Image (cartoon, rainbow, N blue to C red):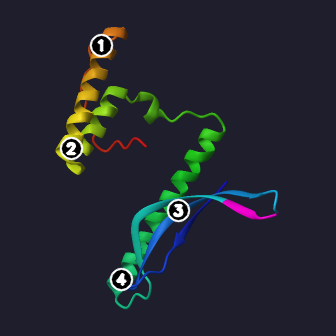
C-alpha cells in the first residue's frame, strides 16, 4: 500500500489537499485495469500561486501538517500490518466512545434523530449493566482523544 498527498486544482486559486491510499490494481476478465484507491480529504488547502509572504508561509505550514498526517497514517498502517496494537484504542471504553458520538450528533443533527440515538444509547447502557460484570462505568474526560 502506498499513501500519498494529492493536490486538487479548484477555482479561486486554492488547492485542497487529500490523502490517497493506493492498494494496487486489478485486471478483470475483459482486460480492463481498475485501480484500488481510498481517498481521505484533509481540511487543509494551499494557495496555487502565493503572492504575499503570508500566503507562502501558510503553504509551508500546511505542507508540514500534511506530511505529518501522511507519516502518521503510514505508521498506523504498518503497525497494524505487523501486529502491533494501538494503545489508544485498547484503553478506550466503548460506553464513553458512544457518549462522544452522541455529543457530536447533538451538535450536527436534528432533534428527532438525536432522540432516537439517545434512546438506543440508554438501552445499550442498561443492557451492559445487566449482562456485563462491571456495573460502575466512570465518565472520564477524553479531551483531545480522537477515536477513528
Q: Residue furthest left?
A: 111
Residue 118 vs residue 73: left or right?
left
Earlier along the polypeptide chain: callout 1 or callout 3? 3
The percent coordinates of residue 54 (x first, y second) are 32, 82
Nearer the observer: mark 4 or 2; the answer is 2
The percent coordinates of residue 80 (x first, y second) are 60, 39
Are circles 3 and 2 on residues that touch, CB within 8 Å? no
How packed mark 2 is, by other alpha carbons closer than 10 Å (few <14, some 14-19, many 20 or more), is some
Q: Which residue is tagged 4?
A: 55
Earlier along the polypeptide chain: callout 4 or callout 3? 3
Earlier along the polypeptide chain: callout 4 or callout 2? 4
Measured Cα–Cα span from mark 4 to mark 3: 22 Å
Q: Which residue is tagged 3?
A: 19
What residue do we see at 43% from left, 43% from top?
Answer: 148
Q: Secondary structure at mark 1?
A: helix
Q: Which residue is tagged 2?
A: 106
Earlier along the polypeptide chain: callout 1 or callout 2? 2
Q: Quadrant of the N terminus?
A: bottom right
Query: Residues in magenta?
Result: 31-35
Choose between 35 and 140: the one closer to the eye.
35
The numbered disc on residue 129 is 1
Q: Secondary structure at mark 4?
A: helix
Amino acid at each position: 500500500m502506498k499513501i500519498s498527498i494529492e493536490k486538487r486544482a479548484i477555482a479561486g486559486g486554492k488547492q485542497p489537499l487529500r490523502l490517497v491510499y493506493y492498494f494496487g490494481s486489478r485486471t478483470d476478465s475483459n482486460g480492463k485495469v481498475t485501480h484500488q484507491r481510498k481517498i481521505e480529504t484533509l481540511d487543509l488547502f494551499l494557495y496555487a500561486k502565493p503572492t504575499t509572504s503570508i500566503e507562502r508561509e501558510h503553504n509551508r505550514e500546511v505542507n508540514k501538517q500534511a506530511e505529518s498526517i501522511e507519516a502518521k497514517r503510514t505508521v498506523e498502517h504498518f503497525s497494524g500490518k505487523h501486529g502491533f496494537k494501538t494503545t489508544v484504542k485498547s484503553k478506550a471504553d466503548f460506553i464513553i466512545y458512544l457518549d462522544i458520538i452522541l455529543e457530536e450528533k447533538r451538535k450536527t443533527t436534528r432533534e428527532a434523530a438525536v432522540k432516537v440515538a439517545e434512546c438506543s444509547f440508554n438501552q445499550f447502557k442498561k443492557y451492559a449493566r445487566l449482562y456485563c460484570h462491571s456495573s460502575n462505568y466512570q465518565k472520564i474526560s477524553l479531551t483531545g482523544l480522537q477515536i477513528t
